[in-house]
Image (cartoon, helix red, strand yellow):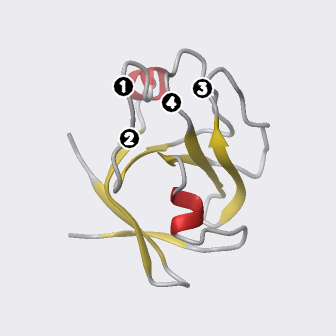
Amino acid sequence: MKQLTLRNAGKAVTIGTRIVPADTFLTRLFGLLGRTGLEPGCGLLIRPSSGVHTMGMLFSIDVVGLDKAMRVVKVWRRLRPFRMTSLSLKIKSVLELPAGQIDACQIECGDQLEIVEA
């Protein structure tokens, strides 16, 4: 399974080193279902996506909405199970992270994220 390293370019902060891309119908469909949590450094980059839900999940997550240039458009902190984010035409991909990661990495609207090539 392919894993990416994702950084906040403007703040020089590594967000995660084990971010899994969800860019096929099946990987987007199943997302984080069946997992009992996300470890630090892990996450799911869903593309394309304009919003997500946590139906059937067993844990809270942080969610970051990104535009086509991977600039942060919206953040949802500690989204609990059985909730939904709002939808936005500006959001082209969504990053799901362990709860608390948005604050730990100081992710804010307007931040530029980047995939770091190994």
Q: Could you tell me the amino acid type at mark 1? A: Arg
Circle 3 is placed at which residue position?
54
In this rendering, would 26 be left or right of 58?
left
Circle 4 is placed at which residue position?
59
How crowded pointer 3 is (Cα within 10 Å; few <14, some 14-19, many 20+) is rated as some
Q: State yes or no: discs 2 and 4 in contact (Cβ < 8 Å).
A: yes
How crowded pointer 1 is (Cα within 10 Å; few <14, some 14-19, many 20+) is rated as few
Q: Label 2 to label 4, Cα distance in Å?
A: 9 Å
How crowded pointer 4 is (Cα within 10 Å; few <14, some 14-19, many 20+) is rated as some
Q: State yes or no: discs 1 and 4 in contact (Cβ < 8 Å).
A: yes
Nearer the observer, 88 or 56: 56
Provide residue 56's location: percent of width, then percent of height. 54, 15
Which element type, helix, strand or loop, lies under badge 4? loop
Which element type, helix, strand or loop, lies under badge 3? loop
Circle 1 is placed at which residue position?
35
Q: Could you tell me the amino acid type at mark 3? A: Thr
Closer to the N terminus: mark 1 or mark 4?
Answer: 1
Closer to the N terminus: mark 3 or mark 2?
Answer: 2
Q: Label 3 to label 2, Cα distance in Å?
A: 13 Å
Of tags 1 and 4, the one toward the viewer is: 4
Residue at 61%, 38% in the rendered image = 49
Q: State yes or no: discs 1 and 2 in contact (Cβ < 8 Å).
A: yes
Residue at 78%, 37% in the rendered image = 87
Of tags 4 and 3, the one toward the viewer is: 4
Residue at 52%, 69% in the rendered image = 105
Q: State yes or no: discs 4 and 3 in contact (Cβ < 8 Å).
A: no
Closer to the N terminus: mark 4 or mark 3?
Answer: 3
Provide residue 85's location: percent of width, then percent of height. 73, 36
